[in-house]
Image (spheres, rainbow, N blue to C red):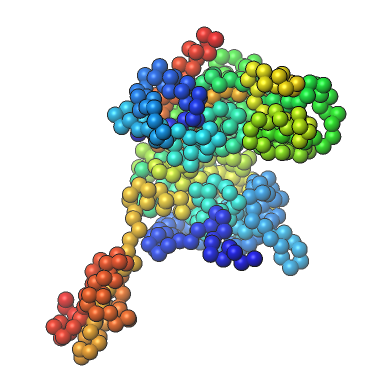
Amino acid sequence: MLTIALSKGRLAEQTIELLEKAGYDCTAAKEKSRKLILEDTKAGLRFIMAKPADVPTYVEYGAADIGVVGKDTLLEEGKQLYEVVDLGFGKCRMCVCGRTELKGNLDAIPNKRVGTKYPNITRKYFEDVKKESVEIIKLNGSVELSPLIGLSEVIVDIVESGRTLKENGLDVLETIADISARVVVNRVSMKMKANEIKPMIESLRTQADLINKKV
Amino acid sequence: MGNNRFYTPDGFTDTVPGICAFKKQSEAKLRRLFELNGYNEIETTGIEYCDIYTSTSFVSEESLYKMQDSKGRLLCARYDGTVPAARFAATIMREEKTPIRLCYIENMYRYSQIGGGKQSEFTQAGVELLGETGSNSDAEVIALAIRSALELGVKDLQVSVGQVELFNGIVRQFNMEESIVQDLKDAIAAKDSVSIDRVAGKLGLSKDEHQTLSLLSESTGTYEVVDLFENRVTDEGASKALKNLREILNILDDYGFLKYVNIDLGLFGSVDYYTGMIFKGFTYEVGFPIISGGRYDKVVNVFGRDLEAVGFSLGLSLAITALMRQGKKCITGVADAIVGYDNKVEGARSAAIALAEKLRASGSIVILDTAEMNESQLDEYADSRRIGASFYINESNADMGGNN
């Protein structure tokens, strides 16, 4: 039996679709219900529906063998996991954003205040890459508000199309990393359940390659 | 002030009776095993100067439990068994002829680190074989680690063995720049094929060289992995590393332990600590390795004596958690039997004492009732505390000398 932690929402749907294409029976996971654990003993799969930010934790502790989660969450949580497949969907960028007029002038502001849902990524980027100290303000949503209302000078957030930014007079100032959905595996499960996990990784990789080539 | 008096600090738990007894028995088994193999147990101080960890780059400062002595010098709680043992071997045992075999069973203290299932305090049992290089000592330590797990009852065991010098040799062979090596190492360790491909592209490697890097992270097996790489490496250090792995496999085969072993060339450890063979041991039901070991030839040097070293540590708390979740060990009752007696009957007490002693002599854990319970109270008590049997001595059996 393999336990797979899915990130509730669109990412879970896309993952199930891909697993089915790879030949896995995911009837259990498609059941429309509020159940958090969906089990199919015949297929040998158990799905748990978790909040995306918790998926790396479930997998790190071995409560789930496999997880599918965005690279943004992996970077933020910094867990010890095997990161085996880039699924290619859920694509976006982790960026420093701010008012359009700051473009090219970011370094001119001393002691920046940065609003973000990703305090660890933010700290790492400003300390390791830009070699500066910043004041990080942890927010939980609608991060774009913070530079508009004067809570911070810039934000660090994921950018998909950039439309929300534009409509609010903001723009991408710097790109920190490219993001997409990743398959992660617990380090012990990889060894102890290799017979089940390795074929799954292989077929997911094949499916992901097919999709990515089409694009 | 004082509102936390009911609780244990974050990361710390008490050990309840059934588990504590099992843990102590497990410790005794390992202590005996280490002793039988010629490893002398030492106790290092529970508190060290921070310098033993921070003057090297082996441990991140944030994970140490720190305090000060009366002169304001920075101290820390014991973080691991290896560094204190290295200090011990380099200082107290500086005149001893090598090889030196040491072992320890101690509690370790780490801020939110992996190790005890994220516990801050956990027990590790480990050995250090100092002053010897080569495959014989590498294999002895792996074999002893496997034996330790088996001794505890961990039968579903897998041990992955790697060799950090193979990677270092390939880095030289491919002339890689220093700046990219860490990224590549992280990618291989995380089995992150996307990043491996990216780095290979950046380096402009040939298809064959690229494949060598991918194989580092993907290969599993035993001899076939060594064979595979023998055709791919030209660097002298890398070839030596492969020879070392082959010899280790040969020796472990002599122990009959090959079935527990597989090669994983993506094992590097979290810090630049290991200088040769490295290994981790896994079992079901816990998400972290229960065994961690390898060769660290530069650690003792920090303390002023040039001694090579190889060793392992086994996370006892983690292994016990695994056994319980695997259903191989349940929390037992407090005793096998309880003996009570009717105080009003002459000779009942001496019969009860005799019976208790007799049962104890045969290895049973026996409580002699001191609360003067009657027969039904005694049964009820035995029931609620999961005591296997209860014996009550009264006028009907007092003269039987406890032959109940």
Residue at the spot x=33%, y=49% of the render?
Answer: B327
Q: Is residue B22 left or right of residue A75?
A: left
Vertical order, B73 against B164 (above or below): below
- Could you say where residue B404 lies in the image, as x and y percent from the top left? 16, 76
Q: Is residue B73 left or right of residue A59?
A: right
Vertical order, B98 against A114 (above or below): below
Q: Is residue B370 visible?
A: yes
- Could you say where residue B177 lies in the image, as x and y percent from the top left? 69, 25
Q: In which quarter of the image is residue A174?
A: top right
Q: Which of B116 and B1 is in front in this view?
A: B1
Where's the C terminus of chain A, which quadrant?
top right
- Could you say where residue A87 lies in the image, as x and y percent from the top left? 51, 21
Q: Can residue B91 be seen in this view?
A: no
- The residue at the far top in this view is A214
Q: Is residue B234 left or right of residue B30?
A: right
Where's the N terminus of chain A, which quadrant?
top left
Residue at the spot x=52%, y=37% of the render?
Answer: A54
Q: Nearer the viewer, residue A161 or B335?
A: A161
Residue at the spot x=50%, y=45% of the render?
Answer: B292
- Could you say where residue A47 lies in the image, as x and y percent from the top left? 40, 32
Q: Quadrant of residue A115?
A: top right
Q: Is residue B191 left or right of residue B385?
A: right
Residue at the spot x=67%, y=36% of the render?
Answer: A139
